[in-house]
């Protein structure tokens, strides 16, 4: 009998423990179901804008519209003369006189400076005496021939001696002129580095003359722009120091790359009395134009791993939009894909926005 009692007690204990475990499992399952139902309700309220805990972010928007968009290549440029030449002597020597100053207008052939040509001058003086003698003898022989005195051979010999003396003097004068520095063009003296007593040689770059009626702006572009810049492209020359600008067209594009600088030359021919050689300016070359472009400020574009992103206003909520950008200019970037005319792009207050955040649009 005792044995049966001992067997019944453990069985009852086990049954009691099993009942308690079943109650806890049921209670846990009920709580989980309740939590799931609450999460669904919370999500539904948030989607409907019922999350009153998150305040609307104040923003400023701009409505994008189709506009004329031009992209420029900008480079530093300098004004030079289309005729920009150096004047130098044909013979070496010591400078005796400098006859011009910077800014002076000169004519083609005008003497700009003289070199010491004392030896050549002495030879010319000696030749002048010989030329005078042969001229007198020729005139005397002409008078005798008119009186039927003398022979024709004597007359011809006197004439030949006189003409030879003339040519000898002309040669000596030409030799003397080799010691003069003359202007090869009409223009303005742009540089003078010579002074009396300096030694100079043929080919020296001591005096520069520029034709200011034919000026040009020159610049060098990196080789990555070769093939993207063409003659006839619209150009804007900006002169910051004068507060002025000129709109013109590109007149020359080199097809050769400088092997040392890896650049190529572009030029714009210009005219105008207010411009001067060696003036600096900014050259802006239009290399792309779209008359129906959608543009936004470059600053609103956010770089992400998925691409370029910006935010627009959609029903007073921020909507993240991935866009494809094109060329940029003056702080504006062209949007190729992702936007349409009339979209309101958030331009202020976008920094801390997430997709779907409530926003308050201000002015």
Image: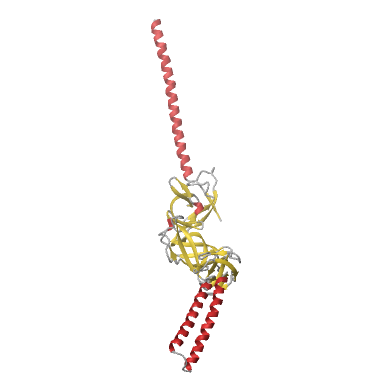
- Asked whether 51 or 23 is in front, the reply is 51
Residue drawn at 53 percent across, 44 percent down: 54
Residue name at image x 53 percent, y 80 percent: 130
The residue shown at (44%, 31%) is 32
Q: Position of residue 158 (x, y in %)?
A: 47, 85
Residue 178 shows in the view: yes
Residue 67 shows up from this direction:
no
Which residue occupies the extreme front position in the image?
A: 150
Q: Nearer the viewer, residue 313 or 223?
A: 223
Q: Eyeballing the image, is 192 above or below 315?
A: below
Q: Position of residue 105 (x, y in %)?
A: 57, 73
Residue 43 in percent (x, y) is at 46, 41
The image quadrant that residue 94 belongs to is: bottom right
Counting from the top left corner in percent of width and height, residue 267 is at 47, 65
Q: Nearer the viewer, residue 185 or 345?
A: 185
From what the image shows, is residue 313 above or below residue 123?
A: above
Quarter of the image with the C terminus is bottom right
Along the horizontal axis of the image, is 199 left or right of 147?
A: right
Q: Quadrant of the N terminus?
A: top left
In this picture, is 14 found above or below 95? above
Number of callouts in the render?
Answer: 0
Farthest-out residue, bottom? 147
113 and 18: which is toward the camera: 113
């Amino acid at each position: 009998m005792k044995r049966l009692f001992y067997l019944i007690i453990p069985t009852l204990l086990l049954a009691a423990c099993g009942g308690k475990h079943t109650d806890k499992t049921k209670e846990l399952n009920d709580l989980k179901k309740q939590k799931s139902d609450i999460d669904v309700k919370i999500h539904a309220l948030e989607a409907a804008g019922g999350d009153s805990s998150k305040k609307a972010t104040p923003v400023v928007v701009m409505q994008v519209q189709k506009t004329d968009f031009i992209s420029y290549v900008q480079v530093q440029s300098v004004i030079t003369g289309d005729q920009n030449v150096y004047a130098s002597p044909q013979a070496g020597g010591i400078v005796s006189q400098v006859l011009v100053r910077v800014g002076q207008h000169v004519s083609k052939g005008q003497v700009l400076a003289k070199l010491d040509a004392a030896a050549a001058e002495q030879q010319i003086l000696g030749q002048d005496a010989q030329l005078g003698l042969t001229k007198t003898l020729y005139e005397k022989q002409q008078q005798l021939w008119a009186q039927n005195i003398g022979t024709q051979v004597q007359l011809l010999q006197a004439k030949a001696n006189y003409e030879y003396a003339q040519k000898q003097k002309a040669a000596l004068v030409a030799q003397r002129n080799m010691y003069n520095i003359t202007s090869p063009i009409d223009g303005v003296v742009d540089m003078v580095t010579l002074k009396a007593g300096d030694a100079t040689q043929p080919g020296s770059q001591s005096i520069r003359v520029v034709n200011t009626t034919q000026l040009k702006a020159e610049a060098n572009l990196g080789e990555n722009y070769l093939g993207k810049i063409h003659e006839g492209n619209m150009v804007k020359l900006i002169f910051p120091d004068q507060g002025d600008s000129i709109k013109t067209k590109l007149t020359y594009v080199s097809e050769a790359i400088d092997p040392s600088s890896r650049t190529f030359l572009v030029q714009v021919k210009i005219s105008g009395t207010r411009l001067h050689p060696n003036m600096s300016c900014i050259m802006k070359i239009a290399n792309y134009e779209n008359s129906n472009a959608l543009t936004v400020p470059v600053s609103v574009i956010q770089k992400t791993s998925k691409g370029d992103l910006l935010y627009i206003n959609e029903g007073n909520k921020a909507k993240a939009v991935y866009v494809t950008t094109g060329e940029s200019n003056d702080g504006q970037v062209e949007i190729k894909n992702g936007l349409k005319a009339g979209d309101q792009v958030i331009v202020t207050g976008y920094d801390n926005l997430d997709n779907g955040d409530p926003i308050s649009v201000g002015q």
